[in-house]
Image (cartoon, rainbow, N blue to C red):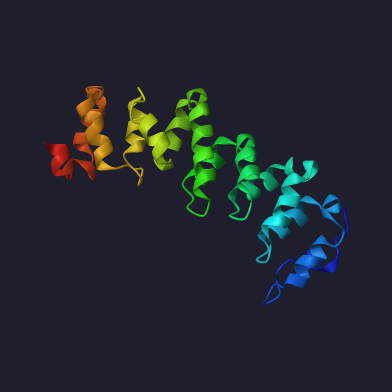
Amino acid sequence: MVMRNNTLTRGFSAAKPSREELAELLDRGVSALTEDDALSIIDHPFVTSAIIQKIAHDPRLSSLYSVRLKLVAHRRTPQMYAAKLVHYLHWPDLVRLSVDVMVPAPVRRAIDTQLLARVTQLTLGERIAAARRCSQALIKHFLFDPDPKVFAALLVNQRLREEELLALIASGRATRDQLSLLANDIKWSFRYAIRR
């Protein structure tokens, strides 16, 4: 078992985390950090973009999934590193980060690009789960999914907009099942434009 110094074992339990505490975490250098050390540093309130860049640049640390995930989600991660690390994240994490407003918009766009590139490889269950909470980029894709269960899941997505449903109806590509689900949906069937 790796022994950790007192600063690391106590975490940030002190009333006010300090810059000195962050300096103690970094005093051995990035190459000596453990996974827990790196995660603690990324979560530290005084962490800077330069420190995060050092962690992202270290091949050993950036190969750890938990560190990659934290780096992509952190606002201070340089966008070049965050966009590169997006390619190595799992589908559920990508879907969650794509709608997280704390993630910078350019990184969310890179996530959407990655999601759209992978969407054809998903199972029905993964498509249903993603449709419930996905971003606008995937909503536009899932509107035309052939399985009615995906459309039913999409109807509960809080990011789905009325104009997208109207565009689907007007496109002539809406299936009978989709129109039936829409007509019986408690939320959407009461919208005048959709009823019309």
Q: Is residue 81 visible?
A: yes
Q: Is residue 20 above or below residue 174?
A: below
Count of numbered tags: 0
What residue is shown at x 52% (from left), y 23% (from top)?
121
Residue 88, x across and y down, in percent: 64, 35
Q: In front here: 105 or 174? A: 105
Q: Is residue 57 above or below residue 169?
A: below
Horizontal relation, residue 95 to residue 143: left or right: right
Residue 103, x across and y down, in percent: 53, 51
Residue 176, x across and y down, in percent: 22, 23
Q: In front here: 1 or 130? A: 130
Q: Is residue 113 above or below residue 32?
A: above
For the C terminus, give its image quadrant: top left
What residue is shown at x 66% (from left), y 43% (from top)?
81
What residue is shown at x 73% (from left), y 43% (from top)?
62
Residue 114 figure quarter? top right
Q: Is residue 181 visible?
A: no
Residue extending farthest to the left is 196
Residue extending farthest to the bottom is 15
What residue is shown at x 75% (from left), y 54% (from top)?
38
Residue 75, x across and y down, in percent: 58, 55
Q: Is residue 126 above or below residue 158?
A: above
